[in-house]
Image (tube, rainbow, N blue to C red):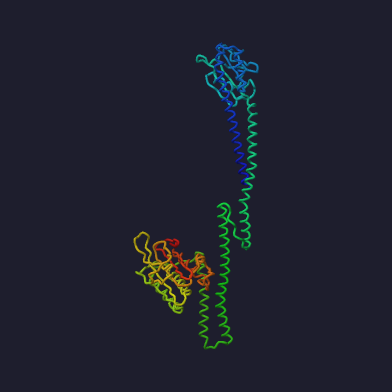
Amino acid sequence: MITYSAVILLVIVVLALLFTRWAESYVYRQKQEQLLAAGQALQPVAGLYLTGQLDQAGLESHFNTAARTAGARVYLLSERRGRALLPGWSPAAGPNAAGAKTGAQAKPSGGPGSNAVFGQAIASIWQGQTVLSRKITLPALQSEVVLVGLPVSSAGTVKGVLLLASPLSEMQQLLRQIYLRIWLAALLALLPALALVYLVARRLVAPLKELQRAALRLAAGESPPDLPPGESSELADLAAAFNYMKNRLHRLEKQRNEMIAAISHELRTPLTSLRGFLQAMSDGVIDREQYPRYLQLAHSETMRLIHLVQDLMDLARLQSGNFTLQPAPCPVSQLLEETVAAMQLAAQEKQVDLQLTPLPREIAITCDRERLKQVLLNLLHNAIKFTPPGGWVAVQAGWQPPPGSGGAPEFSACSGSALAHPASANNTGPKVAPPGPGLVISVCDQGPGIPAEDLPFVFEKFYRAEKTARLAGGSGLGLAIAKNLVELHGGCIAIDSQPGRGTAVTVWLPAAETAQPCEPE
């Protein structure tokens, strides 16, 4: 508020100063114009006087009237008459006064031309020029005046000098009154302006203070309520950004707690089993003939722990930027067949029909084969896990040609095709549009689907949808790792799902060095 007040005060002071300068200039200009008009009216009268056509009384009458009207002193310097007329004061010496040479150029001594600047002005007038001076010292008055000097000519010859002078003291008195009114108006304008600034500042600062209090509560570990949108668009944007940050931090904290609970559960379960096996074998509860069976179970639990720790390490390396791929040429058909073959046993145990649509032609890309296989195994594991017995899981792949190339896509996206069997002619639904040329792989299932409100978060680490069994169980790391690995290849991964109608995950890998987001059509 202090800053706003200072700005308003500065603006008003600057405006007041400008108005005072303008008023001063206007008053002086008006006075000069008034004196010039009066002098031009007196020029013919002075000419008559100098040529002997007007007597002294007539001249003084005209000069006195002009002096009263213009508020000025009127002087006439004449070679022939040798005197200057000063209404209301003693006559001043003219150019041919005592001590001057007869017929010499007018150079008054002891009269109005006694100082150098004034003498130069008089000399210019004797040469036929009109002089307007805003500030000059008039020796006859011993004060500064606004001066207008005009030549009085007859038959083309300058016969005299007509001077009209207005003392600055009288004008400054008028200017002081004008200045007083200007600064009084500035003061009267400043008071309501400061009051308005105070009210506006309070309206602006109040939401910021509320934001500050909410930020301090958030920093203290509390969960403040959402801030209401401000009246201005900027404050509304700020409140929305803070609310988003607060809710995001709350979600991350919730995910962190869930992560701790999930990791604790994932670690506790195999460790509890291992402890039970070892304790039972140590106590002799288990017959030696059963040792191989329980050792196999212990091995399985140990591998489960290793996989969990490996997933955590992989995700940490991926997100820290220290993960390095080992790209090499890779036949896509072979990679897909190996991946599907590795998951066939799990699909048969779940009574799920796992299908691989053959590629129309062989496609080779440059990728890290093991990491891309890790992505596909993760997607197939989730698809089989959440597809009910008797359902199907379909894997499709193909080449997406460059836009405008005229080539037809070799890939028939099954995004949304969980609405019907992939072999069905009624395979319709929302599609995920590949952003450019490259390899497209899609894994579709007939699982329960994912609610729309959970879709934006399924690729976040440790995220678990609460309203669906889609992400129930597990540590919640698989899709986060898959997303990071695909993006590390310069590709993208997208998911399309509807509750009760299945899910499709589409992976796009570029043909060149590009990285664009997968956008729904």
In the image, 11 versus 423, the foreground residue is: 423
Q: Quadrant of residue 504?
A: bottom left
* Above or below, comparing residue 130 to residue 204 in the picture: above
Choose between 149 and 368: the one closer to the eye. Answer: 149
Between 129 and 68, the one nearer to me in the picture: 68
Residue 317 locus on image (x, y percent): 51, 67
Q: From the viewer's perspective, tell me whether residue 474 is left or right of residue 432.
A: right
Picture coordinates of residue 163, whole percent (x, y) = 58, 20
Residue at the far front in the pictured view: 426
Side of 411 relative to 137 (left or right): left
Q: Position of residue 423 (x, y in %)?
A: 38, 72
Q: Nearer the viewer, residue 463 or 326?
A: 463
Query: Which image quadrant for residue 46?
Result: top right
State which quarter of the image contains the C terminus: bottom left
What's the residue at 62%, 39% (across, down)? 13
Quarter where residue 11 is shown = top right
Looking at the image, residue 295 lies above or below residue 331: below
Report the number of discs.
0
In the rendered image, residue 138, in percent from the top left (x then y), is placed at 62, 22
